[in-house]
Amino acid sequence: MEVALFGAGRIGRIHAGNLARQPGVTLRYVVDVDAGAASALAQQHGAQVTSADAVFADPRIGAVVIGSSTDTHADLIVRSAAAGKAIFCEKPVDLSVERARRCAEAVQRAGVACLIGFQRRYDPTFNAVRERIAKGEIGDPEMLVVTSRDPGAPPVAYLERSGGIFRDMLIHDFDIFRWILDDEAATVYATGSVLTDPAVGSVGDIDCTAVTIRTRKGRLCQINTTRRAAYGYDQRFEVIGSKGMLQANNHRPTEVVASTAAAVSCDLPEHFFLERYKAAYAAEMAHFFEALANGTKVRTSIDDGVAALVLADAATASWREQRIVTL
């Protein structure tokens, strides 16, 4: 299968490297508004720089990987679906639920595979928790507590167009909530503050949040996030059930523990998401092409992308209006 990649930035480079490792898959084209970045990435992988129009007109391209900016996702999904090409798209589908739903309708009409890049579902540790819940190890899940903290905020110029912390950062946590509890939200209450950088507030955003979700089955989920964790990328959750608890803790560069008369110490967590989810990104890409080869459903569909965005919108409304939002 020949593939086109949209986006030659940080996540595009990750996906290009993982593409190159898939048997029977060739990266044919790279498309990016930054001609220099596109050329460098294409040269690295023996691909060609071209335009979006050329990609959609080329019948040899069987799939596209969309790692470009969020404001391009919806158009590229719709055009890819119309051209009959399988789609791998980074989150979010769009910043608008209405446009995201139109994308889902276009994918359904075309009958093409469309995977949305919620890479945390492919993380080996998180997957192990999900599988052990399914086997009944802790009985019926009753409560999920998610800790999701970045080591630092993105530039303010990025935050201005990110759609806000709930759509940009917590959308991963909303997806984890649905996946781990296998349930849907009935109510959402979100609050937040600007605690790490006043500049974040100047663009109408917040950098710390606390979200409480009550599910249709009466289960509870609490999500706490911050844009600043001085000790590294903090990604943990625990599931409390009728028979016990399962925890997924941080990954560290090594698991060495040093014990001396002064202290007992270990490595800090992995510094950022590129390190923490290296294995997950690789597994996600492998799953996409395995699903295409076998004609099976992808694990994170465009419907999952829409559902997470609905929760992000509900949390945003809850925070702004200081009320519980019923779904």
Image: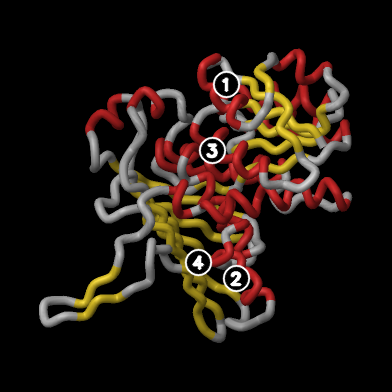
Residue, x 34% and y 29% (percent of image)? 155
Tag 2–tag 4 contact (CB < 8 Å):
no
- SS of the residue at dot 1? helix
Q: Earlier in the sequence, mark 4 or mark 3?
A: 4
Q: Is residue 98 visible?
A: no
Distance between mark 2 and mark 4 Cα atoms: 15 Å
Q: Earlier in the sequence, mark 1 or mark 3?
A: 1
Residue 317, placed above or below residue 273: above
Residue, x 45% and y 51% (percent of image)? 275
Distance between mark 2 and mark 3 Cα atoms: 30 Å
Which residue is disc 4 drawn over? 144
- SS of the residue at dot 2? helix
Which residue is disc 3 drawn over? 313
- Identify the amino acid type marked 4: Leu
In this view, the mark in front (4 or 3): 4
What number is the disc on residue 128? 2
Q: Nearer the viewer, residue 264 or 224?
A: 264
Most distant residue in the bottom direction: 243
Tag 2–tag 1 contact (CB < 8 Å):
no
Residue, x 56% and y 64% (percent of image)? 126
Mark 1 packing: few (<14 Cα in 10 Å), some, or many (20+)?
Answer: many
Mark 3 packing: few (<14 Cα in 10 Å), some, or many (20+)?
Answer: many
Tag 1–tag 3 contact (CB < 8 Å):
no
Q: Earlier in the sequence, mark 2 or mark 3?
A: 2
Q: Nearer the viewer, residue 63 or 177?
A: 63
